[in-house]
Image (spheres, helix red, strand yellow):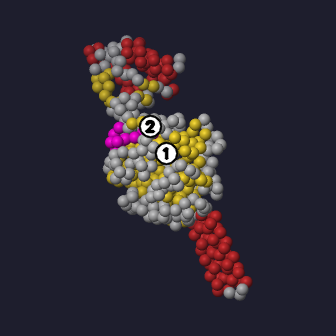
Amino acid sequence: MGNSSLAILYRDCCQRHGSSEITNFTCDATETARAWIFYVLFDILDVDIKLKKILNMKKRLVLILPFLSIFIFSGCSLSAPVKEKTSLGGFEVFDVRQERGSLWKTADGGHTFESKSQINEQNMISSADILSIDYHPQKPKVIYVSSVESGIFKTENAGETWQPIAFPPKKIYSFLLDRSDPDNRMFAAGVVSDWGKIFRTKDGGANWEEVYTEPGQKVTITSLAQHPRETNVIFAGTSKGTVVKSVDAGDTWKNIGSEVDGLVSHIAFDSRKNPSTYLLMFDKKFYYSSNGGSEWIDWEKEKDKEVSDMQKKAADAAQKGNTSQAKSLREKASDLSKRNKENKMPSGIVSITADPTLSGVVYAGTKNGFFRGVEHGKYWYEINIIESGKGFPIRSIAVNHTNPKEIVYLAGKAFYKSKDNGATWEVTGLEIDRDAAFVSYDPFDTNFLFLGLREF
Protein backbone atom coordinates (compact mmCIF):
# COMPACT_ATOMS: atom_id res chain seq x y z
CA MET A 1 0.00 0.00 0.00
CA GLY A 2 1.47 3.38 -1.05
CA ASN A 3 1.86 6.53 1.01
CA SER A 4 -1.09 8.23 -0.67
CA SER A 5 -3.33 5.24 0.14
CA LEU A 6 -2.24 5.34 3.77
CA ALA A 7 -2.93 9.05 3.87
CA ILE A 8 -6.45 8.40 2.59
CA LEU A 9 -6.90 5.63 5.18
CA TYR A 10 -5.85 7.97 7.96
CA ARG A 11 -8.12 10.75 6.73
CA ASP A 12 -11.10 8.43 6.37
CA CYS A 13 -10.41 6.95 9.78
CA CYS A 14 -10.36 10.37 11.41
CA GLN A 15 -13.57 11.36 9.65
CA ARG A 16 -15.35 8.16 10.73
CA HIS A 17 -14.45 8.91 14.33
CA GLY A 18 -15.62 12.49 14.39
CA SER A 19 -12.40 14.38 13.72
CA SER A 20 -13.01 15.81 10.25
CA GLU A 21 -11.03 18.97 11.08
CA ILE A 22 -7.72 17.22 10.42
CA THR A 23 -7.61 17.45 6.63
CA ASN A 24 -5.54 19.00 3.83
CA PHE A 25 -2.30 17.27 4.67
CA THR A 26 0.40 15.42 2.77
CA CYS A 27 2.75 12.78 4.13
CA ASP A 28 6.07 11.64 2.76
CA ALA A 29 7.63 8.20 3.17
CA THR A 30 8.69 8.86 6.76
CA GLU A 31 5.04 9.25 7.76
CA THR A 32 3.98 5.78 6.60
CA ALA A 33 4.38 4.24 10.07
CA ARG A 34 2.30 7.02 11.64
CA ALA A 35 -0.53 6.42 9.18
CA TRP A 36 -0.58 2.69 10.01
CA ILE A 37 -0.46 3.39 13.77
CA PHE A 38 -3.47 5.65 13.59
CA TYR A 39 -5.42 3.31 11.35
CA VAL A 40 -4.80 0.31 13.62
CA LEU A 41 -5.33 2.14 16.89
CA PHE A 42 -8.57 3.78 15.88
CA ASP A 43 -10.06 0.60 14.43
CA ILE A 44 -8.90 -1.93 17.04
CA LEU A 45 -9.74 0.19 20.05
CA ASP A 46 -12.80 1.62 18.32
CA VAL A 47 -11.98 5.08 19.62
CA ASP A 48 -14.75 7.63 19.44
CA ILE A 49 -13.04 10.99 19.83
CA LYS A 50 -15.68 12.66 21.90
CA LEU A 51 -15.19 14.15 25.31
CA LYS A 52 -17.62 11.88 27.18
CA LYS A 53 -16.21 8.64 25.85
CA ILE A 54 -12.63 9.74 26.33
CA LEU A 55 -13.36 10.36 29.99
CA ASN A 56 -14.74 6.78 30.28
CA MET A 57 -11.76 5.07 28.68
CA LYS A 58 -8.74 6.39 30.53
CA LYS A 59 -6.71 3.23 30.06
CA ARG A 60 -7.05 3.27 26.30
CA LEU A 61 -6.39 7.02 26.19
CA VAL A 62 -3.09 6.52 28.02
CA LEU A 63 -2.05 4.14 25.26
CA ILE A 64 -3.14 6.42 22.44
CA LEU A 65 -1.96 9.86 23.58
CA PRO A 66 1.79 9.21 23.09
CA PHE A 67 1.12 8.27 19.48
CA LEU A 68 -1.13 11.29 19.04
CA SER A 69 1.56 13.63 20.33
CA ILE A 70 4.21 12.12 18.05
CA PHE A 71 2.02 12.69 15.02
CA ILE A 72 0.60 16.10 15.88
CA PHE A 73 3.90 17.77 16.68
CA SER A 74 6.05 16.37 13.86
CA GLY A 75 6.65 15.65 10.15
CA CYS A 76 3.47 16.15 8.11
CA SER A 77 3.39 19.26 5.99
CA LEU A 78 0.11 21.07 6.50
CA SER A 79 -1.06 24.19 4.76
CA ALA A 80 -1.95 25.98 7.99
CA PRO A 81 0.13 28.71 9.65
CA VAL A 82 2.21 28.39 12.82
CA LYS A 83 0.33 27.59 16.03
CA GLU A 84 -2.93 26.77 14.28
CA LYS A 85 -5.66 25.85 16.77
CA THR A 86 -7.23 22.46 16.04
CA SER A 87 -10.12 20.67 17.75
CA LEU A 88 -9.28 17.06 18.59
CA GLY A 89 -11.89 15.16 20.56
CA GLY A 90 -13.14 18.28 22.30
CA PHE A 91 -9.61 19.40 23.26
CA GLU A 92 -7.84 22.39 21.69
CA VAL A 93 -4.27 21.74 20.59
CA PHE A 94 -1.72 23.88 18.74
CA ASP A 95 0.29 22.60 15.81
CA VAL A 96 3.76 24.12 16.14
CA ARG A 97 5.35 24.17 12.71
CA GLN A 98 7.90 26.13 10.73
CA GLU A 99 6.09 29.06 9.14
CA ARG A 100 6.27 29.00 5.36
CA GLY A 101 6.83 31.84 2.98
CA SER A 102 9.21 32.93 0.24
CA LEU A 103 9.50 36.53 1.43
CA TRP A 104 10.52 37.64 4.91
CA LYS A 105 10.81 41.07 6.49
CA THR A 106 12.31 42.61 9.61
CA ALA A 107 11.11 45.91 11.05
CA ASP A 108 13.73 46.12 13.80
CA GLY A 109 17.00 45.94 11.92
CA GLY A 110 17.26 42.16 11.92
CA HIS A 111 16.40 41.11 15.48
CA THR A 112 13.15 39.43 14.39
CA PHE A 113 11.75 38.35 11.03
CA GLU A 114 8.28 37.42 9.88
CA SER A 115 6.90 36.00 6.66
CA LYS A 116 5.42 38.60 4.30
CA SER A 117 4.17 36.32 1.55
CA GLN A 118 0.41 36.81 1.48
CA ILE A 119 -1.44 37.33 -1.81
CA ASN A 120 -4.95 37.12 -0.39
CA GLU A 121 -6.82 35.14 2.26
CA GLN A 122 -6.55 31.92 0.26
CA ASN A 123 -3.13 32.21 -1.38
CA MET A 124 0.44 33.03 -0.44
CA ILE A 125 3.88 33.00 -2.06
CA SER A 126 4.97 29.95 -0.10
CA SER A 127 7.16 27.90 -2.43
CA ALA A 128 8.19 30.34 -5.18
CA ASP A 129 11.94 30.68 -5.65
CA ILE A 130 12.60 34.42 -5.35
CA LEU A 131 15.30 35.96 -7.54
CA SER A 132 15.46 39.68 -6.85
CA ILE A 133 13.81 42.75 -5.33
CA ASP A 134 13.35 46.29 -6.63
CA TYR A 135 11.97 49.32 -4.80
CA HIS A 136 9.96 52.14 -6.34
CA PRO A 137 12.26 55.18 -6.03
CA GLN A 138 9.45 57.62 -5.12
CA LYS A 139 6.80 55.47 -3.40
CA PRO A 140 8.08 53.92 -0.15
CA LYS A 141 5.55 51.08 0.06
CA VAL A 142 5.73 49.93 -3.57
CA ILE A 143 8.09 47.00 -4.07
CA TYR A 144 8.56 44.39 -6.82
CA VAL A 145 10.02 40.90 -6.59
CA SER A 146 10.74 38.36 -9.30
CA SER A 147 10.69 34.58 -9.03
CA VAL A 148 12.10 31.73 -11.09
CA GLU A 149 8.87 30.07 -12.22
CA SER A 150 6.07 31.93 -10.44
CA GLY A 151 6.28 35.29 -12.18
CA ILE A 152 6.61 38.85 -10.88
CA PHE A 153 4.86 40.21 -7.80
CA LYS A 154 4.10 43.75 -6.68
CA THR A 155 3.13 45.13 -3.28
CA GLU A 156 1.70 48.57 -2.58
CA ASN A 157 1.64 48.18 1.21
CA ALA A 158 5.27 47.33 2.02
CA GLY A 159 4.80 43.57 1.72
CA GLU A 160 1.56 42.99 3.60
CA THR A 161 -0.06 41.64 0.42
CA TRP A 162 1.26 40.96 -3.07
CA GLN A 163 -0.36 40.91 -6.48
CA PRO A 164 1.00 38.95 -9.47
CA ILE A 165 2.09 40.64 -12.70
CA ALA A 166 1.75 38.54 -15.84
CA PHE A 167 4.97 37.71 -17.73
CA PRO A 168 4.87 35.65 -20.97
CA PRO A 169 7.72 33.15 -20.46
CA LYS A 170 7.37 30.46 -17.83
CA LYS A 171 10.80 31.09 -16.30
CA ILE A 172 12.43 34.36 -15.25
CA TYR A 173 16.19 34.61 -14.89
CA SER A 174 16.63 38.30 -14.11
CA PHE A 175 14.49 41.39 -13.59
CA LEU A 176 14.80 45.14 -13.06
CA LEU A 177 12.49 48.07 -12.44
CA ASP A 178 13.37 51.13 -14.53
CA ARG A 179 14.21 53.93 -12.08
CA SER A 180 13.46 56.62 -14.66
CA ASP A 181 9.86 55.40 -15.20
CA PRO A 182 9.07 52.99 -12.33
CA ASP A 183 5.29 53.12 -12.71
CA ASN A 184 5.42 51.79 -16.25
CA ARG A 185 8.71 50.37 -17.45
CA MET A 186 10.31 47.10 -16.38
CA PHE A 187 12.74 44.64 -17.93
CA ALA A 188 12.76 40.87 -17.43
CA ALA A 189 14.78 38.06 -18.98
CA GLY A 190 13.19 34.73 -19.76
CA VAL A 191 13.37 31.73 -22.05
CA VAL A 192 11.03 30.98 -24.96
CA SER A 193 11.55 27.64 -26.74
CA ASP A 194 15.14 27.45 -25.40
CA TRP A 195 15.97 30.97 -26.59
CA GLY A 196 17.16 33.47 -24.01
CA LYS A 197 15.36 36.81 -24.42
CA ILE A 198 14.94 40.20 -22.75
CA PHE A 199 11.45 41.68 -22.55
CA ARG A 200 10.34 45.21 -21.73
CA THR A 201 7.00 46.59 -20.62
CA LYS A 202 6.00 50.24 -20.88
CA ASP A 203 2.60 49.91 -19.21
CA GLY A 204 3.35 48.33 -15.85
CA GLY A 205 3.24 44.73 -17.08
CA ALA A 206 0.01 44.72 -19.10
CA ASN A 207 1.97 44.16 -22.31
CA TRP A 208 5.53 42.95 -22.93
CA GLU A 209 7.73 43.36 -26.00
CA GLU A 210 10.89 41.47 -26.90
CA VAL A 211 13.91 43.78 -27.11
CA TYR A 212 16.82 41.31 -27.25
CA THR A 213 17.37 37.64 -28.03
CA GLU A 214 20.41 35.39 -27.89
CA PRO A 215 21.37 33.89 -31.27
CA GLY A 216 21.96 30.41 -29.86
CA GLN A 217 19.60 28.11 -28.01
CA LYS A 218 20.03 27.10 -24.37
CA VAL A 219 21.79 30.37 -23.49
CA THR A 220 20.02 32.36 -20.77
CA ILE A 221 20.20 36.01 -19.75
CA THR A 222 21.44 35.53 -16.19
CA SER A 223 21.92 39.15 -15.10
CA LEU A 224 20.33 42.54 -15.77
CA ALA A 225 21.51 45.84 -14.26
CA GLN A 226 20.61 49.49 -14.74
CA HIS A 227 23.12 52.22 -14.05
CA PRO A 228 21.97 54.08 -10.91
CA ARG A 229 22.64 57.54 -12.35
CA GLU A 230 22.61 57.10 -16.12
CA THR A 231 19.30 55.27 -16.27
CA ASN A 232 19.27 54.76 -20.03
CA VAL A 233 22.31 52.49 -19.60
CA ILE A 234 21.44 48.83 -19.10
CA PHE A 235 23.83 45.87 -18.93
CA ALA A 236 22.93 42.24 -19.54
CA GLY A 237 25.06 39.12 -19.02
CA THR A 238 24.52 35.56 -20.20
CA SER A 239 25.21 32.03 -19.00
CA LYS A 240 28.02 31.78 -21.60
CA GLY A 241 29.88 34.97 -20.66
CA THR A 242 28.47 37.38 -23.22
CA VAL A 243 27.94 40.92 -21.90
CA VAL A 244 25.83 43.40 -23.85
CA LYS A 245 25.01 47.03 -23.16
CA SER A 246 22.22 49.40 -24.16
CA VAL A 247 22.49 53.18 -23.89
CA ASP A 248 18.92 53.88 -25.07
CA ALA A 249 16.84 51.97 -22.48
CA GLY A 250 16.83 48.71 -24.40
CA ASP A 251 16.12 49.84 -27.96
CA THR A 252 19.57 48.78 -29.23
CA TRP A 253 22.46 46.73 -27.81
CA LYS A 254 26.18 46.25 -28.35
CA ASN A 255 28.65 43.59 -27.24
CA ILE A 256 31.14 44.55 -24.50
CA GLY A 257 32.10 41.17 -23.06
CA SER A 258 34.74 39.72 -25.38
CA GLU A 259 37.39 39.48 -22.63
CA VAL A 260 35.38 37.59 -20.01
CA ASP A 261 34.49 33.95 -19.61
CA GLY A 262 31.88 32.13 -17.52
CA LEU A 263 28.34 32.62 -16.26
CA VAL A 264 27.63 36.30 -15.55
CA SER A 265 25.85 36.24 -12.19
CA HIS A 266 26.29 39.81 -10.90
CA ILE A 267 26.78 43.25 -12.44
CA ALA A 268 27.39 46.16 -10.05
CA PHE A 269 28.29 49.82 -10.34
CA ASP A 270 30.67 51.97 -8.29
CA SER A 271 28.94 54.39 -5.93
CA ARG A 272 30.75 57.46 -7.23
CA LYS A 273 32.58 56.95 -10.52
CA ASN A 274 30.07 56.64 -13.35
CA PRO A 275 31.98 54.42 -15.81
CA SER A 276 33.30 52.05 -13.12
CA THR A 277 31.57 48.68 -13.35
CA TYR A 278 32.08 45.34 -11.59
CA LEU A 279 31.36 41.95 -13.10
CA LEU A 280 31.24 38.53 -11.46
CA MET A 281 31.58 35.29 -13.37
CA PHE A 282 29.96 32.91 -10.90
CA ASP A 283 32.48 30.89 -8.89
CA LYS A 284 35.25 31.87 -11.31
CA LYS A 285 36.46 35.46 -11.55
CA PHE A 286 35.85 39.10 -10.70
CA TYR A 287 36.36 41.77 -13.38
CA TYR A 288 36.56 45.55 -13.26
CA SER A 289 35.99 48.12 -16.01
CA SER A 290 36.97 51.78 -15.70
CA ASN A 291 35.26 52.75 -18.96
CA GLY A 292 31.77 51.35 -18.82
CA GLY A 293 32.59 47.90 -20.14
CA SER A 294 34.71 48.79 -23.17
CA GLU A 295 37.60 46.96 -21.48
CA TRP A 296 37.53 44.49 -18.59
CA ILE A 297 40.46 44.11 -16.21
CA ASP A 298 41.42 40.79 -14.63
CA TRP A 299 43.25 42.22 -11.61
CA GLU A 300 45.36 39.11 -10.96
CA LYS A 301 46.81 39.20 -14.46
CA GLU A 302 47.23 42.96 -14.25
CA LYS A 303 49.11 42.74 -10.93
CA ASP A 304 51.43 40.03 -12.27
CA LYS A 305 52.17 42.30 -15.23
CA GLU A 306 53.00 45.20 -12.88
CA VAL A 307 55.55 43.06 -11.02
CA SER A 308 57.03 41.79 -14.28
CA ASP A 309 57.37 45.33 -15.66
CA MET A 310 59.10 46.50 -12.48
CA GLN A 311 61.52 43.59 -12.59
CA LYS A 312 62.38 44.45 -16.20
CA LYS A 313 63.04 48.05 -15.19
CA ALA A 314 65.35 46.82 -12.42
CA ALA A 315 67.24 44.65 -14.91
CA ASP A 316 67.59 47.58 -17.33
CA ALA A 317 68.90 49.83 -14.55
CA ALA A 318 71.44 47.18 -13.51
CA GLN A 319 72.57 46.76 -17.13
CA LYS A 320 73.19 50.51 -17.33
CA GLY A 321 75.24 50.39 -14.15
CA ASN A 322 72.68 52.17 -11.96
CA THR A 323 72.95 49.69 -9.07
CA SER A 324 71.09 51.79 -6.47
CA GLN A 325 68.10 52.26 -8.75
CA ALA A 326 68.14 48.59 -9.68
CA LYS A 327 68.17 47.58 -6.01
CA SER A 328 65.29 49.93 -5.20
CA LEU A 329 63.21 48.58 -8.10
CA ARG A 330 63.88 44.96 -7.13
CA GLU A 331 62.78 45.68 -3.55
CA LYS A 332 59.62 47.37 -4.78
CA ALA A 333 58.89 44.45 -7.09
CA SER A 334 59.40 42.02 -4.19
CA ASP A 335 57.11 44.01 -1.88
CA LEU A 336 54.47 44.28 -4.58
CA SER A 337 54.64 40.56 -5.32
CA LYS A 338 54.22 39.83 -1.61
CA ARG A 339 51.19 42.11 -1.35
CA ASN A 340 49.65 40.56 -4.45
CA LYS A 341 49.87 37.11 -2.88
CA GLU A 342 48.56 38.22 0.51
CA ASN A 343 45.68 40.25 -0.91
CA LYS A 344 44.77 38.25 -4.00
CA MET A 345 41.24 37.80 -5.31
CA PRO A 346 39.43 35.13 -3.25
CA SER A 347 38.36 31.93 -4.93
CA GLY A 348 34.80 30.62 -5.13
CA ILE A 349 33.05 34.01 -5.24
CA VAL A 350 29.26 33.59 -5.46
CA SER A 351 28.06 37.16 -4.76
CA ILE A 352 29.32 40.74 -4.91
CA THR A 353 27.97 44.07 -3.66
CA ALA A 354 29.43 47.52 -4.30
CA ASP A 355 29.59 49.77 -1.24
CA PRO A 356 26.75 52.30 -1.76
CA THR A 357 28.75 55.24 -0.38
CA LEU A 358 32.50 54.46 -0.62
CA SER A 359 34.01 54.56 -4.09
CA GLY A 360 36.29 51.68 -4.99
CA VAL A 361 35.03 49.39 -2.20
CA VAL A 362 33.32 46.14 -3.11
CA TYR A 363 32.30 43.12 -1.00
CA ALA A 364 32.45 39.48 -2.04
CA GLY A 365 30.74 36.46 -0.54
CA THR A 366 32.41 33.14 -1.28
CA LYS A 367 31.72 29.50 -0.62
CA ASN A 368 33.67 29.69 2.63
CA GLY A 369 34.32 33.31 3.58
CA PHE A 370 33.63 37.04 3.34
CA PHE A 371 35.98 39.61 1.76
CA ARG A 372 36.32 43.35 1.22
CA GLY A 373 37.98 44.61 -1.95
CA VAL A 374 39.64 48.01 -2.23
CA GLU A 375 40.93 49.99 -5.20
CA HIS A 376 37.99 48.65 -7.23
CA GLY A 377 38.74 45.06 -6.29
CA LYS A 378 42.47 45.11 -6.94
CA TYR A 379 43.33 44.06 -3.40
CA TRP A 380 41.22 41.92 -1.06
CA TYR A 381 41.07 41.54 2.72
CA GLU A 382 39.26 38.76 4.54
CA ILE A 383 36.62 39.90 7.02
CA ASN A 384 36.64 38.02 10.31
CA ILE A 385 33.24 36.32 10.45
CA ILE A 386 31.89 33.64 12.79
CA GLU A 387 33.87 30.49 12.02
CA SER A 388 30.83 28.18 11.82
CA GLY A 389 29.32 30.46 9.17
CA LYS A 390 32.17 29.66 6.82
CA GLY A 391 30.61 26.28 6.15
CA PHE A 392 27.87 27.93 4.08
CA PRO A 393 28.10 30.03 0.90
CA ILE A 394 27.40 33.75 1.34
CA ARG A 395 24.91 34.35 -1.47
CA SER A 396 23.77 37.81 -0.46
CA ILE A 397 25.35 40.89 1.13
CA ALA A 398 23.93 44.33 1.87
CA VAL A 399 25.54 47.53 3.15
CA ASN A 400 23.53 50.22 4.92
CA HIS A 401 23.47 53.21 2.57
CA THR A 402 23.21 55.60 5.52
CA ASN A 403 26.05 53.96 7.50
CA PRO A 404 28.75 52.06 5.56
CA LYS A 405 30.02 50.43 8.76
CA GLU A 406 26.79 48.44 8.99
CA ILE A 407 27.00 45.27 6.91
CA VAL A 408 24.64 42.30 6.77
CA TYR A 409 24.82 38.93 5.09
CA LEU A 410 23.16 35.52 5.15
CA ALA A 411 24.80 32.13 5.58
CA GLY A 412 22.83 28.92 6.02
CA LYS A 413 19.80 29.73 8.15
CA ALA A 414 21.31 32.65 10.03
CA PHE A 415 21.30 36.42 9.56
CA TYR A 416 24.55 38.23 10.45
CA LYS A 417 24.84 41.95 11.13
CA SER A 418 27.88 44.06 11.98
CA LYS A 419 27.80 47.68 13.11
CA ASP A 420 31.59 48.07 13.25
CA ASN A 421 32.74 47.23 9.73
CA GLY A 422 32.91 43.50 10.38
CA ALA A 423 34.80 43.43 13.68
CA THR A 424 31.88 41.88 15.62
CA TRP A 425 28.59 40.31 14.60
CA GLU A 426 25.02 40.01 15.83
CA VAL A 427 23.45 36.67 14.84
CA THR A 428 19.75 35.92 14.34
CA GLY A 429 18.49 32.41 13.58
CA LEU A 430 15.97 32.13 10.75
CA GLU A 431 13.03 29.70 10.64
CA ILE A 432 13.27 29.31 6.86
CA ASP A 433 13.05 26.26 4.63
CA ARG A 434 15.49 27.34 1.89
CA ASP A 435 18.56 29.48 1.33
CA ALA A 436 18.17 33.21 0.79
CA ALA A 437 18.68 34.63 -2.69
CA PHE A 438 19.01 38.17 -1.38
CA VAL A 439 18.97 40.40 1.65
CA SER A 440 18.11 44.03 0.98
CA TYR A 441 17.77 47.27 2.93
CA ASP A 442 14.63 49.31 2.34
CA PRO A 443 15.96 52.54 0.78
CA PHE A 444 13.48 54.65 2.79
CA ASP A 445 14.02 53.10 6.23
CA THR A 446 17.04 50.94 7.03
CA ASN A 447 15.29 49.30 9.98
CA PHE A 448 13.37 47.38 7.33
CA LEU A 449 15.10 44.58 5.43
CA PHE A 450 13.66 41.95 3.09
CA LEU A 451 14.83 38.38 2.48
CA GLY A 452 13.90 36.35 -0.58
CA LEU A 453 14.21 32.56 -0.43
CA ARG A 454 15.24 30.21 -3.19
CA GLU A 455 16.32 26.62 -3.76
CA PHE A 456 19.87 26.40 -5.12
- Determine which of the numbered discs, if any, sits on residue 249 in the image: none
Residue 337 appears at what percent x and percent y? 62, 70
Instruction: Choose top left, top right, bottom left or bottom right for residue 56.
Output: top left
Q: Residue placed farthest to the right in the image?
A: 319
Residue under the point 60% across and 47% down = 239
Residue 83 appears at what percent x and percent y? 33, 32
Q: Mark 1 — residue?
A: 187
Determine whether label 2 and label 1 are within 8 Å by CB. no
- For the residue carrying disc 1, how many other residues have a C-alpha within 10 Å: few (<14), some (14-19), or many (20+)? many
Question: Left or right: 57 with respect to 327?
Answer: left
| 372 is higher (above) or lower (below) than 28 | below
Q: How many marks?
A: 2
Q: Magenta segment range?
A: 151-161
The chief SS type of the magenta part is loop
- As for residue 261 lying within the magenta part, the answer is no
- For the residue carrying disc 2, how many other residues have a C-alpha within 10 Å: few (<14), some (14-19), or many (20+)? few
Residue 215 appears at what percent x and percent y? 64, 44
> Mark 1 falls on what kind of element?
strand
Rounded to the nearest angstrom, the CA distance separating label 2 from label 1 is: 13 Å
Q: Mark 2 — residue?
A: 206
State the residue in front, 434 or 307: 307
Question: Left or right: 343 with respect to 433?
Answer: right
State the residue in front, 191 or 83: 191
Residue under the point 49% across and 18% down = 5
Residue 382 appears at what percent x and percent y? 51, 61
Depth check, mark 2 against mark 1: the one in front is 2
Q: Amino acid at mark 2?
A: Ala
Q: Amino acid at mark 1?
A: Phe
